[in-house]
Image (tube, helix red, strand yellow):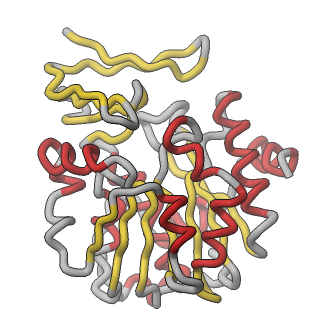
Amino acid sequence: MNWYTESWSDECKFSIAYDEKINSEKTPFQQIDFYKGKEFGTFFTLDGLMMVNEKDEFIYHEMIVHPAFATNPNIKRVLIIGGGDGGTAREVLRYKSVEEVVMVEIDERIFRLCQKYLPVTAGGIEEEPRMTLKFEDGLAYVKKAPDASFDLILVDSTDPISVGEGLFTIEFYQECYRVLRNDGILINQHESPYFTEYAENMKRAHKKIKHIFPITHVYQYHMPTYPSGHWLFGFASKVYDPLLDLHAEDWKKFKIQTKYYNTELHRGAFCLPNYVREALVDGE
């Protein structure tokens, strides 16, 4: 039996059995490895860190997308920064009311390999007429984008290291603020509160967002194959509050069948444990 193992901290490791390694290559940006096993199906790693697997990808992709649409059901234009596996775009495209989706992924090979090995996330994305794919740097793209051109920005990034580092900067968030319309929403990767290194990244991300957007919240979801399983997204907006402005009945009219997200869970996801609340306050 073969084992994929990654370190969650200096004293904690996580392992998954796999039957075969189906692809391995180094791009100008990162090392990409694809594996196939019984428990989690096909999965891939970037620079030795778990990114997406067939078994639990729906949790991440539903939770990065649907809370924004339940808060503002009138979203028409969506910008996805990162998200090369295609899963975030897949969830956005389920909304027939969305008119345009732009996905900006720095490493085209991620998307091409997912088309081949992970069609559950990338299949049919490129063929969708509302979809525009840009294989370039996310920060550079946002800098060039016109003012007030998107209703929603989803930052589906890796951790703030290597190619993902620029997507955790004040400059990037300021550009996102400019590019969003007056009622725009930003959802971004907020890491995990549990292990020290991830918790520090969480604090830094929250502090930067809070200084730019008038409304900021953090919400949680359970991701079994990410370090500790306890992960967070940030919700930032110019006018919308995800709890006060939750349009539960309007969202249900979309009739989108989800496996994880629902509007009751939406409310609960923003109810954070005390240790997370305290850490976020400490980081301000």
Residue at 54% x, 23% y: name it: 8
Q: Nearer the viewer, residue 180 or 28?
A: 28
Q: Quadrant of residue 50?
A: top left
Does 168 appear above or below 159?
below
* Tally of numbered tags: 0
**Residue 222, image x and y in percent?**
49, 45
Residue at 42% x, 83% y: name it: 77
89 lies left or right of 225: left
**Residue 34, image x and y in percent?**
23, 31
Q: Quadrant of residue 215?
A: bottom right
Residue at 78% x, 63% y: name it: 210
Does 62 appear above or below 46?
below
Q: Quadrant of the N terminus?
A: top left
**Residue 66, image x and y in percent?**
44, 70
Does 175 appear above or below 117?
below
Q: Quadrant of residue 36?
A: top left
26 lies left or right of 181: left
Does 43 appear above or below 71?
above
167 lies left or right of 277: left
Residue at 74% x, 46% y: name it: 204
**Residue 48, image x and y in percent?**
40, 24
71 lies left or right of 198: left
